[in-house]
Image (tube, rainbow, N blue to C red):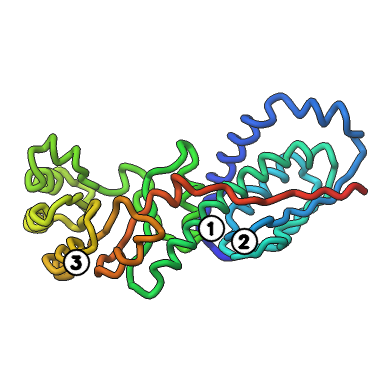
Amino acid sequence: MPEFGLDPEAIAAAVDSALAEDVGDGDVTTRATVPPDARLDARMMARQDLVVAGMPVMREIFRRLAPEAVISITTDDGEAVTAGSEMARIAGRAEALLTAERSALNAVQFLSGIATLTRRYAEAIAGTGAVLLDTRKTVPGLRTLSKYAVRCGGGTNHRMRLDDGILIKDNHIAVADGITEAVTRARAANPRNLSIQAECDTLEQVRDALAAGADRLLLDNMPPQTLRQAVEIVGGRIPLEASGGVSLETIRSIAETGVDFVSVGAITQRAPAVDIGLDFVWE
């Protein structure tokens, strides 16, 4: 299976939360209607073309509720599959599988949705040299898994948390009374020697942030023509990231300006869940 670096502790925490949220004190409907000795075979099937993500989470959900179940994963995370493809097989006690069904599907549908949209954005800029980045625009509590799904889809993670790097945004600049002062303050108060990135709305700010010693610039909502000018001003001295209002229709023209990175909040904030089913076969 491809290695995308999902921490087992993150899987455990996500499963703890999902099962507490969905199962509570138990599946009273299944307990009331399904014979305790009944068994099921199930097939997890893709009902649309998609990029797979979240299979380790699915496995852990079934393992928790049905430890004796036989689970065979037939598609790897990061793999593109077509509608009708089998993704996994699960066989075990009917009661446990029925209780786990919704949590398992929710996880894989949500994460595969992010991976699928990410793949579309990554493919849109293939060959330009620009790298697709995500943002911190994630569902609260699901950032680690969401950013994992981005990696499965071919994207690269930006900051995971606020302590991963200094990113001076427009509000910081306003409070600090200008981008030069904000960058200067950041350089003076940076004992961990973190990378300092400054958001620029204008070419004047690009020049000022560069002169002040920023390590990287975030070019916010600049049209392609202005991005090209910023690339020319910086001349390859520090990396440039374009962000703001990026869509599938515009991302290639943005990437072709010569920026090093393009960040897209939509891949984690607005990715639709994909259609995946769990088809049961009674023994």
C-alpha span from label 3 to label 2 = 36 Å
Q: Is residue 84 left or right of residue 263?
A: right
Rendered residue at 83%/37% (across/down): 95
State how far apart marks 3 and 1 are (Cα). Answer: 30 Å
Q: Residue at x 57, y 65 (%)?
A: 2
Where is residue 260, by image quadrant?
A: bottom left
Q: What element carries label 3?
A: helix
Q: Residues within 10 Å of mark 2 (few under 14, many from 20)?
A: some
Is 227 situated left or right of 46 in this image?
left
Q: Residue 133 carries which label?
A: none
Q: Earlier in the sequence, mark 3 or mark 1?
A: 1
248 shown above or below 17? below
Work out which quarter of the rendered image holds the N terminus and state it. Answer: bottom right
Circle nearer the viewer, 2 or 1: 2
Residue 228's label in the rendered image is 3
Name the residue that disc number 2 marks. 49
Query: How many other residues sit within 10 Å of disc 1, few (<14), some (14-19) or many (≥20)?
Result: many
Q: Identify residue for label 1.
A: 116
Element assignment for label 1: helix
Q: Which amino acid does label 1 sit on?
A: Thr
Q: Residue at x 57, y 47 (%)?
A: 273
Please, what is the three-letter code of the amino acid marked with disc 3?
Arg
